[in-house]
Image (cartoon, grey):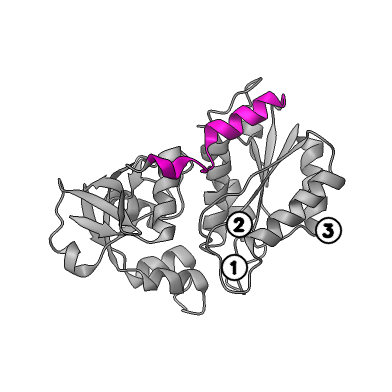
């Protein structure tokens, strides 16, 4: 059976393939989904705060069974295969638990409701390897950090051009760590957010003219914003851990929107989860970094 996927789902497939979303090796099945929604953990206990799922149309969902292999198609061409392990539905209650609101005014809630509630989970394989050519890969960032001689790297997440407060935080990061990894979101964002071109141009100018040479690395992160506040802050930290960061900066109302989350709710959740996020880090271009001091909010 062939299932057509959109650009955001294709990017999830690519990010699973590269290891950006490790420990995921596919779209979440029913057991992992339930555990993530309720406890911010996968079924095996590893921290993972956001459901990464494949939605399928109702008319196909009824015929899909565990053991089937689905061909995922994008732009009229096959791009990946998924081995079905389970299927389930995402309810309005699940959406409200993840986003802490059920209001359609919230862009993440609205976008989630635009998807089919029918979900299918299992390991996924990218069959069109050409899609990896320009993908952000953990092996590339870890190699770059190692070549620069960085033993500690602080990651910085942004969806906006740099401003004075961000510069201040980033310079503090450079006091704590050997290098700063600026990793802007360049995937889907809500209407009114800055364009990818504006964000990247501002940061390139900053790096070229104002930041210390050889202490800053920049690369765009192609993934959609979900505006899930505290949960998404932890999700962003996991991605940067996978990319080789030993530290991660969490800002005020990180990944928030409107007034749905408290200014420092993301800090609180990250403090609770941080030891488990960083303990499994495989980044070691130089001396090992202990889990107890590997995450800062």
Q: Quadrant of the N terminus?
A: bottom left
Q: Nearer the viewer, residue 197 or 38?
A: 197
Which structural element holds mark 2? helix
* Residue extent of the magenta highlight: 129-149
Residue 39 image position (x, y, % from top left): 41, 53
Name the secondary structure under disc 3: helix
Give me the C-alpha separation between circle 1 and circle 2.
8 Å
Circle nearer the N terminus (1, 2): 1
In the rendered image, the residue lying farthest to the top is 287
Residue 60 magenta-drawn?
no
Q: Quadrant of residue 141?
A: top right
N-terminal label among 2 and 3:
3
Closest to the camera, between mark 1 and mark 3, is 3
Q: Earlier in the sequence, mark 1 or mark 3?
A: 3
Front position in the image: 242 or 262: 242
Q: Nearer the viewer, mark 2 or mark 3?
A: 3
- The residue closer to the viewer here, 56 or 156, is 56
Q: CA distance from mark 1 to mark 3?
A: 23 Å
Which label belongs to residue 164? 3
Q: Which residue is mark 2?
A: 266
The relative height of residue 261 versus residue 72 in the rendered view (above or below) is: below
Q: Which mark is residue 261?
A: 1
Q: State the image coordinates of residue 223 (x, y, percent, origin top left).
A: 51, 54
- Do the numbered discs 1 and 2 sit on residues whose CB atoms are within 8 Å? yes
Q: Main secondary structure of the magenta part?
A: helix
Q: Is residue 64 visible?
A: yes
Q: How many C-alpha atoms fall within 10 Å of the one at disc 1: few (<14), some, or many (≥20)?
A: many
Q: Residue at x 69, y 54 (%)?
A: 200
Residue 117: quadrant of the picture: bottom left
Residue 266 image offset from top left, x and y in percent: 61, 57
Residue sitting farthest toward the right: 210
Say if residue 210 shows up in the picture: no
């Amino acid at each position: 059976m062939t299932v057509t996927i959109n650009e955001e789902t294709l990017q999830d497939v690519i990010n699973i393939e590269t290891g950006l979303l490790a420990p995921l090796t596919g779209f979440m099945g029913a057991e992992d989904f339930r555990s993530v929604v309720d406890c911010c953990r996968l079924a095996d206990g590893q921290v993972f705060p956001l459901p990464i799922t494949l939605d399928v149309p109702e008319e196909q969902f009824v015929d899909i069974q565990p053991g089937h292999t689905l061909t995922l198609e994008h732009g009229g061409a096959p791009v990946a295969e998924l081995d079905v392990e389970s299927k389930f539905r995402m309810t309005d209650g699940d959406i409200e638990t993840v986003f802490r609101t059920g209001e359609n005014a919230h862009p993440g809630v609205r976008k989630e409701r635009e998807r089919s509630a029918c979900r299918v989970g299992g390991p996924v394989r990218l069959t069109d390897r050409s899609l990896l050519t320009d993908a952000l890969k953990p092996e590339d960032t870890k190699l770059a950090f190692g070549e620069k001689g960085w033993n500690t790297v602080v990651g910085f997440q942004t969806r906006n051009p740099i401003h004075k407060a961000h510069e201040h935080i980033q310079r503090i990061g450079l006091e704590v760590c050997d290098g700063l990894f600026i990793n802007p979101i360049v995937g889907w964002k809500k209407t009114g957010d800055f364009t990818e071109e504006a964000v990247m141009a501002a940061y390139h100018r900053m790096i070229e003219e104002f930041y210390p040479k050889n202490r800053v690395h920049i690369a765009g992160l192609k993934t959609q914003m979900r505006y899930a506040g505290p949960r998404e802050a932890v999700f962003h930290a996991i991605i940067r851990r996978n990319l080789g960061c030993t530290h991660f900066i969490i800002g005020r109302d990180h990944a928030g929107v409107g007034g749905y989350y408290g200014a420092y709710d993301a800090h609180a959740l990250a403090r609770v989860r941080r030891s488990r996020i960083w303990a499994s880090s495989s980044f070691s271009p130089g001396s090992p970094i202990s889990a107890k001091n590997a995450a800062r909010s």
